[in-house]
Each structure stands twice: as C-alpha cells, then as structure tokens.
Image (cartoon, helix red, strand yellow):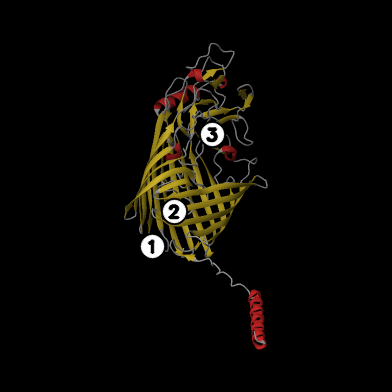
Amino acid sequence: MKPFQRVLLGSAAGLVAVSGAQAADLPVKARPVEYVKICSLYGEGYYYIPGTDTCLKWGGYARADYGWNVAGSMTPAYSGTQGAQDRSVAQYATRHRANFTADARTQTPYGTLRTLLSIHIENVSAFNTAGTVNPVLSRALIQWAGFTFGHAQSYQDTFAINDSWHYLQQQNNSDTAANGTNQIAYTWELGNGMTLTLGADESRRKSLANLTPGSTIIVGAEPTTDVQGQKWPDVHLDFKVDQVWGYWATSVVGHDVSAQYYVAPRTPIAPIVCSGPGPTGAPIGDPITSCGHPDDKIGWAIQTGGEFKLPWLGPGDRFGWGVRYAVGASGYGAGTNVSTASLFGSGNFLAFGAITDGVFINGSDIELTTSWTLQGAYEHGWTPNFKTSWYGSYTRISYNDTAKGFFLTNVCNTVAATNPGINTIVGNCNPDWSFIQVGSRTQWTPVPGFILGVDVGYVRILTAFDGSTANLSGVSVAGSGAITAVTRVSGARPAGVYTFDDQGIWSAVFRAQRNFNAE
C-alpha cells in the first residue's frame, strides 16, 4: 500500500472513532410523557388513569354540625338517657366529618363496570367529652351488567326526608342513603326512565320481645329482644320511573321474624315449666332449647313515594312525599332510626312507646306489630343560592288485641316482683303510640360548593298507656348468675310514680359544609 493511501485510511479510521465517541455522549431521546387526560364519558370531573381505559373521579366533603337538644348524631333527644331532659344530660353536641369518595368506571362489552368507594371519618362529641373518631363505610360497591354487589343505598328506598331537606336526623325515615347497607341486586332497564329491581338487603330489625319476663319493657332502653340470628336477608322488588319532572318509586319487602326460645323459671323452681311465667313472685329465667319456640313468621312492608320538580314556583323548587305500611317489619313502616320513646316532661310526666317487630309470651305465637308512616317536604328557592325547606312526618305503631292481652297480663297491673321493668302500670293498658317530627331548614350557598345552614325541628310523642301511672322504682332483679341492674328512670330523674302524658321537644342544628368535586 502506498504511503498516501495509508494516511487516508488512518485519517478515516480516526474520524469514525471520534464520531462514535461523540455519538455515545449524546443524550438518549426521552419517552413521551403520559399526561392525565380528561374523560368526558360520564360527566364532569372524571380523568383517565394513566395507561388504562378506566375513568376516575375523586370527591368528598368536610362537614361541621353543632346541635342543641340532640345526641351526637344530631338525633333529637327523645329517647334513652337523653330523654330525661334534666341537668344530668348534655343538650349541646357536635359532629365533624370528613368524607372521601372515589368513583371508577370502565366500558366493557356488557356495559359500564363501576366501582364506588366512600368513607366517612367522624368525630362525635357530647357531654363535655373530647369526642371519639369513628370510620364509617358509606359505599363499597361494584356495578356491572345490571348487578349491584356490596355496600350501598338500597333500591327499596322510595322516599325519605334525607340530608337534602334537613340536618336533624329524621327518625322515621326508611332510608339507607347516608351510610348504606349490605346488599345484592339486579336491575332491569325498561326504557323511558323506568327500572325494575330485585334485591336482598341486610335485615332491618327491631326488637322481637318475649313479654313473659317482667324486665322486657324498660324506660330509657330498647325492649329486650329474643330475635333469632339472621336466617335470610330482607328481599324486595322495586319499580322506579325517573324523568325530567322528578321520580316516583314503589317497593314491596319481605322480612324474617323468627324468635329464640321460650324462657323457664330459674332454680330452685322445679320442675322446669315453659308454658307460663311461673308462680307469683318467682323470677323468670333464661331461654333454653328444651322450652321450644314460637313458629317463624314473615313480616312485610309496602312503600311508595316520589319527588316533583316545580321550577315555575322558584329556582330549584320541589315537593316530595312518601307513604309506608308494614306488618312485622317496623324498621320499614316506622323507620330505620326511630327508637323506643322515653321523653320526660316537667314534673312526674313521661311520654313512652315501645317499638318492636312483634311480641309473644311463653307458649304463644308471635303477634306482629303494625306500623305506618306519612311524610312530606317542600323546598322553595328564594334565589339560586338561598333556599328554605319545610318537612313533616307522622308514624303510628300499634299492637293487635292478642298482643294487648300480653301487655295486660305481663306489663300492666302486675306486682313489682313479676314486672321489674316498668313496675305496676295502673289504668290504661294500651301500648299503641305515635311519633311526629316537623321542622324547617334554611340554607345559603355563598360560593359554589360551600353551604351554611340552620335546621330547627320539633318532635312530639303521643304516648302509649296515656293517662295511666307507673311506679319506676329503680330496684334490681336477679340475672343469669349475677345481679343485673334494671334502669327504670333516665338521667337524674328520681324513682317514683309517673303519669304517661304526651310530650314534645325542640331541637336545632347549624351546619357548615364544603364539597369538592362531588355530585
């Protein structure tokens, strides 16, 4: 090879080497950034999860409630120890809540696959305490191809005076909107806004009371229950039409009413007798399998209601109504939250009423309790961001003649030794009673997503045993292997003779709430 050629080849090799080194030093081209994209398939607020075809929406709210003459859950103080209405119980209570919601949706060949999660974290404070923090699962559901699995609002909630109308807790609502219920359901889309749903929910139970023991009915507490463990859920069939004018819904529900065992006298009474309350003065013992039990029964409820939009009367004006009737299913007919009333008035006066799904005595069948409720509400918008609602409801709880006979022989006109719950009711032995709740809420939205409002309400108990008297003694009775204190009076109310008479109370709640990215 000639010298000139060697020089050219060497120079070329050097250039290639230098070029290769410089290329190695150049930065590698970055991969494209996956920006979060807006998802418009399901409305505002949804975004695609990067790298997926799933749309996600975050939401929630922060809430502060300040109540007067209420329990910590903003329940009017008509029951339990709060019903004493004396200086031993707290009238002022607060509740602060943080809610977090995540709604994820994906399109599939069988329709939208949806997952909804919602959690409350609450701090409830009453009676000079710092309060307790409680997590509450509001929603944990999966919806797909017409099915709903999980913890959600029940499809058989037809109408309720819920948080959209008020702040005070409504006692006679049949409603699971706030905290949901465990369920499974299938919904058929019928077209034109109409749906038909078949579902099964966690049972909404009230006490199933054996009146043979005298301590079953107690002032300041729910009746002692002898209900059997849940055998099957509450089944329901629901129809709903939802259109631009509002909605109308109706539902029928089947409810298991099954008891545990009859009770036997305690030792040293022998032999064991399960058919009656035992000799006069003998304490009543515990349920045992050898005593048998009443036959199972099925309670039922029918519910209907709706809401109508009235924009020509004011911005956002609407009217809602509901009717419910139940036999042996008082959690529906009377309401999810309604409690046994024990509301004391000035002097020795007491409004009382026991709520049950049914009652029985040793050797008898279960006598189912009848309950029904009427509800109505109207909301008027004075301006687009200032509105007032008015609401009211009436509930009646009644017992048939056979059940009233059980009250007569085991609760009324009996000696203290065999009736340590409410001692010696003398006079009218009618256990039927009614519950009324009315109120008005005014709400201001100064800026979108932020609300301030006040709710003022009145509760009145139309008492059972009206006009009769009861000796609330405060003694103790023998328990199963121990001495059990049975409370006859609430708070600092003294033992003595009380007259049953209708009573009412006022309550109020102020609320501040900030919503973010929530429907």
Labels 2 and 1: the sequence-earlier one: 2
Q: Circles 2 and 1: CB distance less than 8 Å?
A: no
Query: Which residue, given by chain and number where applicable, does mark 3 sit on?
Result: 222
Query: Which residue, given by chain and number where applicable, does mark 2 sit on?
Result: 113
Labels 1 and 3: the sequence-earlier one: 3
C-alpha span from label 1 to label 3 = 44 Å
- Amino acid residing under circle 3: Glu
Q: Nearer the viewer, residue 427 or 188?
A: 188
C-alpha span from label 2 to label 3 = 42 Å
C-alpha span from label 2 to label 1 = 34 Å
Disc 1 residue crowd, few under 14, some 14–19, many 20+, Cα 10 Å:
few
Above/below status of 383 relative to 362: below
- Amino acid residing under circle 2: Leu
Q: Nearer the viewer, residue 454 or 295?
A: 295
Q: Circles 1 and 3: CB distance less than 8 Å?
A: no
Horizontal and vertical percent for residue 153?
Answer: 46, 47
- Amino acid residing under circle 1: Pro
